[in-house]
């Protein structure tokens, strides 16, 4: 019988793929799990190690560069990731130090750079000896706030500088601290199949501690239980894993049963299927995405949830046009994702300032096209999981200046009902420091 892979080995493969191939953390882990079929405890370990190593990468690199005689960047990617992965465990976990070092040496010996196993062993043991001394070299917040936030809290310097300029040092400090905390886990009840109270009871029977979210009628916040996609309740389509802020988007569009809706950037289908719930699975939803493997996810999720009104379409949303104008459009636009860095820590090392310029231009194109798809009196909801004003408030101000036949149409009680922050112009921002993911959204109406 073939021995199943360890969590550390799987984590190393994932980190190498992220570093060398630009793979996304969640996707490469899911791919490895599907291929290797590891035990559940090893899945949990691999996930913890990958996300933790990515969250703290700047701090790890800063310390490693003091322990090496040459720059960390000069080492092969596989050795860099063994060192990062192992140092993360020594600093941030309770795994026994001897086991971490021994496993690091074994991982190196089992790879193509086995000759560097002595270097790996020496660096990690040297850290153990010099730990207190090395921690004293980390930048102090009072003396070097940018350096502290960049290195100690592992955020890109360009992003830290942007946030300090916008919000100041203290608010930015709270934000980067929150980005390195575990993301809360919530699920959306599939009310087409089960009530929230019934689902809460079923979760309790399955040993999963959970509580209802008072401000969102379908939302449940989990306190325990992480292996959700292997749970029979998931298989039966009783819930969808979704952040609370993301659930607000469908409520803001508030489609009527029987309506025709276009979701222009729909994959993997969370907001699409939520819209279908609110429509009581009657009407029509066109769910677009540019890549076929993503639209197949929309179809899979709709099928699992028992939804029949979603039509997945593969294509460029800037070119697509329905046979007739639609009642509503949801544009959850491609964005920098700076509101979800705690959930997707690899984004912080992937994004560059130039991406912001490109994404703003793409969002503008999508918004302009979305406006042309609506019936008179139709609604357009624009949302992002970004904190950057260029993608949010400034984008909508520009759109309204260019489209005088549109107006902001945010219900007066929406922000209060859903614990969101209503801005003066009728835009919504979701507080980020100690709650759901960071989100921006607004609803626009086309004149009749």
Image (cartoon, rainbow, N blue to C red):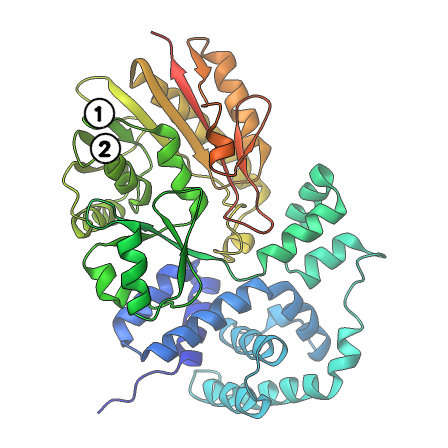
Residue at image location 78% in from the left, 53% down from the top: 145
Asked if residue 35 lies left or right of residue 368, the reply is left
Query: Which residue carries the number 1 mark?
Result: 259
Label 2: how many Cα within 10 Å (few below 14, some 14–19, many 20+):
many
Q: CA distance from mark 1 to mark 2?
A: 7 Å
Label 1: how many Cα within 10 Å (few below 14, some 14–19, many 20+):
some
138 above or below 177? below
Q: From the viewer's side, name the closer residue of 199 and 272.
A: 199
344 above or below 402? below
Query: Which residue carries the number 2 mark?
Result: 279
Kindly tell me whether residue 290 is visible in this rendering: no
Q: Quadrant of the C terminus?
A: top left
Q: Secondary structure at mark 1?
A: loop
Task: Estimate the x, y position of residue 416 in percent, counting from the top left.
Answer: 51, 33
Residue at image location 37% in from the left, 9% down from the top: 447
Q: Secondary structure at mark 2?
A: loop
Q: Find out whether the residues at labels 1 and 2 contact each other: C-beta distance under 8 Å.
A: yes
């Amino acid at each position: 019988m073939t021995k199943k892979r360890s969590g550390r080995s799987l984590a190393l493969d994932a980190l190498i793929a992220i570093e060398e191939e630009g793979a996304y953390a969640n996707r490469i882990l899911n791919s490895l799990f599907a291929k290797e079929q590891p035990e559940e405890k090893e899945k949990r370990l691999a996930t913890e190690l990958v996300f933790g190593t990515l969250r703290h990468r700047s701090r790890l690199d800063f310390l490693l560069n003091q322990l090496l005689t040459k720059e960390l960047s000069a080492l092969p990617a596989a050795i860099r990731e063994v060192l990062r992965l192992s140092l993360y465990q020594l600093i941030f976990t309770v795994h026994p130090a001897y086991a971490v070092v021994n496993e690091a040496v074994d991982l190196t010996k089992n790879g193509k750079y086995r000759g560097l196993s002595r270097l790996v062993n020496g660096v990690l043991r040297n850290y153990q000896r010099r730990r207190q001394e090395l921690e004293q070299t980390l930048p102090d917040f009072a003396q070097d706030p940018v350096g502290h936030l960049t290195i100690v809290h592992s955020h890109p310097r360009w992003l830290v500088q942007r946030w300090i300029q916008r919000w100041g040092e203290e608010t930015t400090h709270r934000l980067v601290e929150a980005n390195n905390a575990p993301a809360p886990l919530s699920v959306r009840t599939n009310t087409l199949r089960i009530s929230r109270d019934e689902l809460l009871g079923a979760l309790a029977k399955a040993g999963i501690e959970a509580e209802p979210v008072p401000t969102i009628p379908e939302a449940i916040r989990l306190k325990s239980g992480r292996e959700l996609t292997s749970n029979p309740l998931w298989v039966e389509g009783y819930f969808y894993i979704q952040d609370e802020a993301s659930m607000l988007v469908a409520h803001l569009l508030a489609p009527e049963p029987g309506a025709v809706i276009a979701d222009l950037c729909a994959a993997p289908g969370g907001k699409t299927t939520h819209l279908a719930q609110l429509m009581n699975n009657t009407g029509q939803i066109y769910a677009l995405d540019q890549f076929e493997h993503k639209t197949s996810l929309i179809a899979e999720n709709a099928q699992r949830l028992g939804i029949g009104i979603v039509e997945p379409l593969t294509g460029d949303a800037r070119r697509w046009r329905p046979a007739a104008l639609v009642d509503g459009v949801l544009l959850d636009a491609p964005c920098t994702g700076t509101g979800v860095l705690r959930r997707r820590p690899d984004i912080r090392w992937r994004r560059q300032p130039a991406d912001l310029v490109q994404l703003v231009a793409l969002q503008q194109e999508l918004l302009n096209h979305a406006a042309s798809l609506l019936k008179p009196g139709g609604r357009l909801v624009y949302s992002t999981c970004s904190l950057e004003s260029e993608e949010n408030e400034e984008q909508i101000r520009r759109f309204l200046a260019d489209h005088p036949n549109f107006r902001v149409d945010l219900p007066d009680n929406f922000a209060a009902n859903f614990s969101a922050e209503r801005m003066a112009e009728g835009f919504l921002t979701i507080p980020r420091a100690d709650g759901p993911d960071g989100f921006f959204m607004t609803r626009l109406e086309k004149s009749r």
